[in-house]
Amino acid sequence: MQLCCVNVLFMKVTRNTVAKGAILDLITNSDSALSHSEIHKLTQDLCDRVTIYRILDRLVNEDVIHKIVNLDGTIKYAKCHHENHVHIHNHVHFSCEKCLKVTCMENVQPSYIIPRNYKVNDVNFTLSGLCPNCL
Amino acid sequence: MQLCCVNVLFMKVTRNTVAKGAILDLITNSDSALSHSEIHKLTQDLCDRVTIYRILDRLVNEDVIHKIVNLDGTIKYAKCHHENHVHIHNHVHFSCEKCLKVTCMENVQPSYIIPRNYKVNDVNFTLSGLCPNCL
DNA sequence: ATTTCAAATGCAACTATGTTGCGTTAATGT
DNA sequence: ACATTAACGCAACATAGTTGCATTTGAAAT
Ligand SMILES: [Mn+2]
Ligand SMILES: [Mn+2]
Ligand SMILES: [Zn+2]
Ligand SMILES: [Zn+2]
């Protein structure tokens, strides 16, 4: 009756499936960002690994989760927490060198001055070091 | 007679080889950061692709070049330009969505406020969008 | 210049990560 | 319940990065 979810880029209707729900739950309830391989291990035999890739892509395009590129190039995913509808991921991510957890720091938004002849569309700020638990 | 170069982490002596020199030249003279595969194509039959990986690791550990993690997770390398001997890569990198070039913006150093119970050791700030050439 | 010796290399084999095509299954609107 | 097509599983492929080991080579010492 009503559209449950759409790909915000192409305004295409997407569907809620068992695997998608389970993976979103996992990401939502995790205290740190999760990689594809971590999700694969945690979900065991929920679905094929290719399906996990496709579900993660879909959730990113639906603006429900966001990608975080770690310092070693590995990609992690975390829940989006947009207060306002305008949705820019300009917050900092912290990557702990000891426990290897990546966390969103929603309220740390760096300021910077960049020449006018650049157009910024997206932002990826990652700090690494020791988190409070490992300090 | 005199040590030409050392791994700053382990204070181990390293050697200058033909391939290392050529790859460093390439990175030094490039106006944008280069990935392993780009270097591999540009150097043709200079050396094995495994050797390129090892040379890049060595140059990073010698603090001669630095790693840049792109928004898609690909890793690029650029020359270090340290004025003072204290050496922190706290400058911004710009990743153009059109020409795909990644450039160092040495004089753009963002400011941020982070809780005291975090210890920051390294920084990776990447902005993406359109560069002056593509705007 | 020759010797010496570990750093660096080439090669093969391997693991990890991500993508594509296609036939089948299942979510959702009617 | 039926029709439509998004989502799925599977196999095959592509790309990125690692490891072990025998051989080569840079450069310090003689
Ligand atoms: Mn985040
Ligand atoms: Mn740089
Ligand atoms: Zn930690
Ligand atoms: Zn450009």
Image: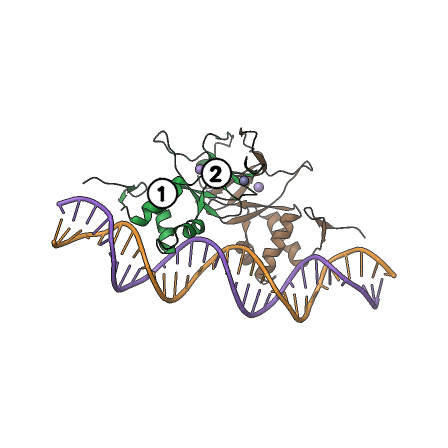
Chain colours: A green, B brown, C purple, D orange
* Same chain letter for marks 1 and 2: yes
x then y, percent, for residue B3: 76, 50
The answer to whether one can see residue B99 in this image is no
* Residue drawn at x 64%, y 58% as measured from the top left: B19
* Residue drawn at x 52%, y 40% as measured from the top left: A95
Could you classify mark 1 by the number of other residues whose Cα lies within 10 Å: few (under 14), some (14-19), or many (20 or more)?
Answer: few
Q: Is mark 1 within 8 Å of ligand 1?
A: no
Q: Which chain carries label 2?
A: A
Q: Quadrant of residue B90?
A: top right
Up/down of B127 relative to B45, above or below: above
Up/down of A54 relative to A123, above or below: below
Could you classify mark 2 by the number of other residues whose Cα lies within 10 Å: few (under 14), some (14-19), or many (20 or more)?
Answer: many
* Label ID, residue A103: 2
Q: Which one is in front, B56 or B44?
A: B56
The answer to whether one can see residue B59 in this image is yes
Mark 1 to mark 2 CA distance (whole Å):
17 Å
Looking at the rendered image, the quarter that the N terminus of chain A falls into is top left
Q: Mark 1 lies on which chain?
A: A
* Label ID, residue A25: 1
Q: Counting residues from the N terminus, which is met first, the one under dot 1 or under dot 2?
A: 1
Looking at the rendered image, the quarter that the C terminus of chain A falls into is top right
x then y, percent, for residue D29: 84, 58
Q: In which quarter of the image is residue B81?
A: top right
x then y, percent, for residue C26: 24, 53
User: Marks 1 and 2: CB-CB under 8 Å?
Assistant: no
- Which amino acid type is shown beneath numbered disc 1? Asp
- Which amino acid type is shown beneath numbered disc 2? Thr
* Residue drawn at x 49%, y 48% as measured from the top left: A74
B128 relative to A22 in the view: left or right: right
